[in-house]
Amino acid sequence: MFHRLCSSLSRSSSIITTFPKSIKSPPFPFPRSLRRAAPTTLSFSSFKMSDNQPPIPSPTKQETLRSLEFHLGSPFTPDPIVPPPNQLIIVISGPSGVGKDAVINKLRESRERLHFVVTATTRPMRPGEVDGKDYFFVTRESFLSMAENDELLEYALVYGEYKGIPKKQIRESMSGGEDVVLRVDIQGAQTLRRILGNSAVFVFLVAESEAAMVERLVDRKTESQEELLVRVATAREEVRHLKSFDYVVVNAQGRLDEAVRRVEAIIDAEKSRVHQRVVRI
């Protein structure tokens, strides 16, 4: 009996071990309680909405902005990140013979929103000059009266004649949103530096060489030999004041446009400063 039972189990074992490899489960069914549930596989198709269900609309731009403001805890302000730049006072100076008037006249043509202050002077009018455009030509008595009434930002006695800058022009122009350009001699620039400090931009014009500067003075033919000697000696001395200015621009012969572009670049750079200059007159 025992022998027949072992033989039966042996035959059953051989049957189990010889199942075809293609068969992954026994040919007879497991009881329901022992069956393992097949793994569930999820995919996007499982969540696909039916054709009858309307799609969820995307948030509008305004809704997105309001949501960002809500989560950040504050609204977005329309105010400029950077305030408009302050108005500037640009002081252009240099020795005689470097072309200050030529640079000023070209700058007047090429750039808007600039007011070129007309200096008051007691010197005689030169050929081609226009009163009120090139200078305000006034008598010595009128000039001294303006100085006494504190109507001038600065004034000086230059080559025996008075020159001064009226304050009224500067105030009115800056309040109107214009930058102010002052064309002064070296003595006037030194005075303005003491008055305005670092609130103004000081630009020093030079010729490409001392020889070129003297040649221009000779070519003007507006002074006698004695006066020319004084001008040349003074110009040579004035070049030494270059280091007290903020910028230097070389106005080389035949390259006026390049010099003017450099002055404009200086103005643009000043407008982009993080710490703006503040002028108080």
Image: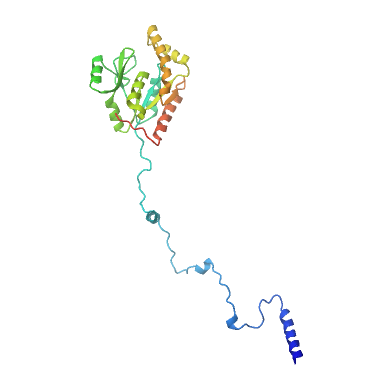
Q: Quadrant where the N terminus lies? A: bottom right
Q: Nearer the viewer, residue 139 or 126?
A: 139
Colour setup of the view: rainbow
Picture quadrant where residue 215 is located: top left
Q: Nearer the viewer, residue 274 or 176?
A: 274
Give how far across and how far down residue 259 sits, in percent. Answer: 44, 24
Residue furthest out toward the bottom: 1
Residue furthest out toward the top: 225
Give how far across and how far down residue 219 sits, in percent. Answer: 42, 12
212 versus 200 height, above or below:
above
Residue 98 visible, this orientation: no
Residue drawn where x is 40% and y is 32% of the image: 270
Q: Nearer the viewer, residue 254 or 235?
A: 235
Picture quadrant where residue 244 is located: top left
Picture quadrant where residue 267 is located: top left
Residue drawn where x is 42% and y is 21% of the image: 242
Q: Quadrant where the C terminus lies? A: top left
198 versus 36 height, above or below:
above
Image side of residue 92 versus residue 34, left or right? left
The total of numbered circles placed on residues is: 0
Image side of residue 43 versus residue 126, left or right? right
Residue drawn where x is 44% and y is 13% of the image: 214
41 versus 12 height, above or below:
above
Residue furthest out toward the front: 2
148 versus 227 height, above or below:
below
Give how far across and how far down residue 213 sits, in percent. Answer: 44, 15
Residue 243 visible, this orientation: yes
Give how far across and how far down residue 11 sits, in percent. Answer: 75, 85
